[in-house]
Amino acid sequence: MEEQRHFVCVTCPVGCNIEAKVRGTELLTLVGNRCARGVDFVKEELTAPRRMLTTTVRVRGAALPLVPVRSEAPVPKGRLLEIAAHLRDVVLDAPVAEHQVVCADVLGTGVDIIASRALERVD
Ligand code: SF4
């Protein structure tokens, strides 16, 4: 059965509003995307949606107790909560370097979690 669906493309900061006609996981037509990456985004949304993950991880020995972290690439949307819960058990020792790998291949997704900023050690 055909249906009309609305998507906001999160591939770039423009955030195009896309109206798509779909049949199940099949993309029939779409309007509203400013570039071809919007087509890929909607196709992925229909089959295996992914999102960037941002959260914080605990740090010992720094001026701040938490360091912001993010996934190096989008992870499966359905696994966001599971990954966030896993990262709640991670504790780093300062110093932390910007882009340091905090958790490699998180939960077998093939995506690394990296630190978004540096934190120096304070003694
Ligand atoms: S369709 Fe293109 S321009 Fe629009 S948000 Fe997606 S990537 Fe950006």
Image (spheres, grey):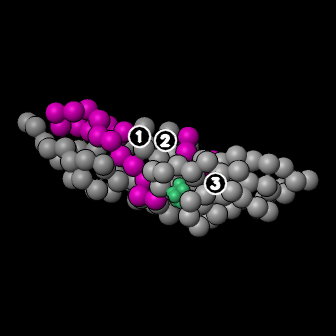
* Residue type at the position of mark 2: Ala
**Quick one: label 2, few (<14), some, or many (20+) residues within 10 Å?**
some
**Nearer-N-terminus badge (1/2):** 1
Q: Does the residue tagged 3 have its C-beta within 8 Å of any atom of ligand 1?
A: yes
Q: Is residue 30 magenta?
A: no
Q: Circle 1 is placed at which residue position?
A: 55
Q: Is residue 53 left or right of residue 33?
A: left
Q: Which mark is residue 84?
A: 2
Residue range highlighted in magenta: 55-81
Q: Circle 3 is placed at which residue position?
A: 32
**Quick one: label 3, few (<14), some, or many (20+) residues within 10 Å?**
some
* Residue type at the position of mark 3: Gly
Q: Position of residue 24 (x, y in %)?
A: 83, 56
**Nearer-N-terminus badge (1/3):** 3
Closer-to-camera residue (12/111): 12
Q: Are marks 1 and 2 in contact (CB under 8 Å)?
A: yes
Q: Is residue 78 magenta?
A: yes
Q: Position of residue 17 (x, y in %)?
A: 61, 48
**Quick one: label 1, few (<14), some, or many (20+) residues within 10 Å?**
some
Q: Residue at point 23% right, 37% down?
A: 60
* Residue type at the position of mark 1: Thr
* Mark 2 element type: helix
